[in-house]
Amino acid sequence: MKILIVDDFSTMRRIIKNLLRDLGFTNTAEADDGNSALPMLENGQFDFLITDWNMPGMTGIDLLKACRASEKLKTLPILMVTAEAKRDQIIAAAQAGVSGYVVKPFTAAALQEKIEKIFERIDANR
Amino acid sequence: MSEKQGKGPALAGTDKSVEPDAETAALAAAGAKSFHAALLARKQALMASLQGDDMAAVADHIHQINQARDETLYFEVGRLTRALHNALRDFHLEIGLDGNAEAKHELSEMVDARSRLNYVIGMTEDAANQTMDCVDEAAPMVQQLVEESGTIHADWKAFQTRSGGADDGSRALFERIDQLLQRISNDGKGIHTRLTDILMAQGYQDLSGQVIKRVIELVSDVEQSLVRLVKLASNVEEVAGIKHSGSQHKGEPVEKQRIRAEGPQINQQNNQNVVSGQDDVDDLLSSLGF
């Protein structure tokens, strides 16, 4: 399981990376915005993407849309972990095809639950 | 203003701000006077044209008066803008000059509002990283302690069973060591949970940083607008010559429709459109068929 973590704050990338390690996922990579993440996703074999929304350069919502528009990445599970908490933003993310949405500040349990749910759904669809 | 002022902030702007008030006040008075003079000068001619039913001349007079008013207005805007610009620049200079050399150096590092805010982001980032370094070091220590005490506990039990015929004193000691090993295991797990909580708490650096970045953006926008206004004001005549029928004022973003990032919500309670937490997000998503 190879996971890409995208956030412009290194603090948050580190937090998520540590949580994933606790959950047993040690194969992670990091990017600080959509522009650097997209080529990594296109060229690497990532199984899961965790992205922030508010980033300079390419935002998370644009990265999400770019992934859904890409032949290779259109089914990639994408979890948004963001401080963006407006209803229309969450609806927009859902319409763009997000797999899960976690608002900051979040708990370790919330992140774990969302990740497990996403993988359950993938297994069910197989 | 938008350029970095790397060094020597104390000397750069002082000479400039000697007498701007008196100077600009005089100029403003002159501006108002010139409009008043233009009005008076046109008054007689306008009346004459009106009485003579010369509508073309009337229109021309009104146009001239309008133009004089516009020029005064632009002049005033320019004056105010320059004053604001100076105030912003002088903001750098208000930093205290006393204190030790190191502090002075640090202060000169953050000469403007933006770099001060960036400084805060940097400080909180360092603090968060330091905290997480400690967590990263402590977590495996605790884990190892738990694992090793678990192994020894099993061996210890076996040893106790083998040496069944111990006296009372030994049995009490066996019991205490047993409890200690049990406690290391339990408390170790508790400590691991607390370490995760400490890790999660460092998320404040991201959230506060996002808010601070917004303020930095705002300051930059205000500065840039001011710089534009200053340039505009320096071309008062040219600008006044242009018919400001509105053509130059469009181009303001109408892209409100587009969904965009806003950063953390500061007044969550007061906004109906903002979710109140993860439960709310989950409800909303499940209502959308998630």
Image: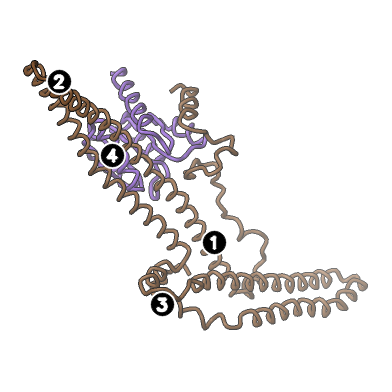
According to the image, label 3 marks what residue? Answer: B8
Residue B170 image-quadrant placement = top left
Label 2 sits on what residue type? Answer: Asp
Task: Indicate which label's residue lies in the foreground, 4 or 1.
Answer: 4
According to the image, label 2 marks what residue? Answer: B168
Q: On the same chain: label 2 and label 1?
A: yes
- Contact, mark 1 vs mark 3 (Cβ under 8 Å): no
Crowding near the residue tagged with mark 1, few <14, some 14–19, many ≥20 C-alpha atoms within 10 Å: few
What colour do you see for chain A? purple
Structural distance between the alpha carbons of marks 1 and 3 = 24 Å
According to the image, label 1 marks what residue? Answer: B222
Label 4 sits on what residue type? Answer: Lys
What colour do you see for chain B? brown
Structural distance between the alpha carbons of marks 4 and 3 = 42 Å
Residue B215, relative to residue B259: is it above or below? below
Q: On the same chain: label 4 and label 3?
A: no
Label 1 sits on what residue type? Answer: Val
Q: Looking at the image, is mark 3 or mark 2 earlier in the sequence?
A: 3
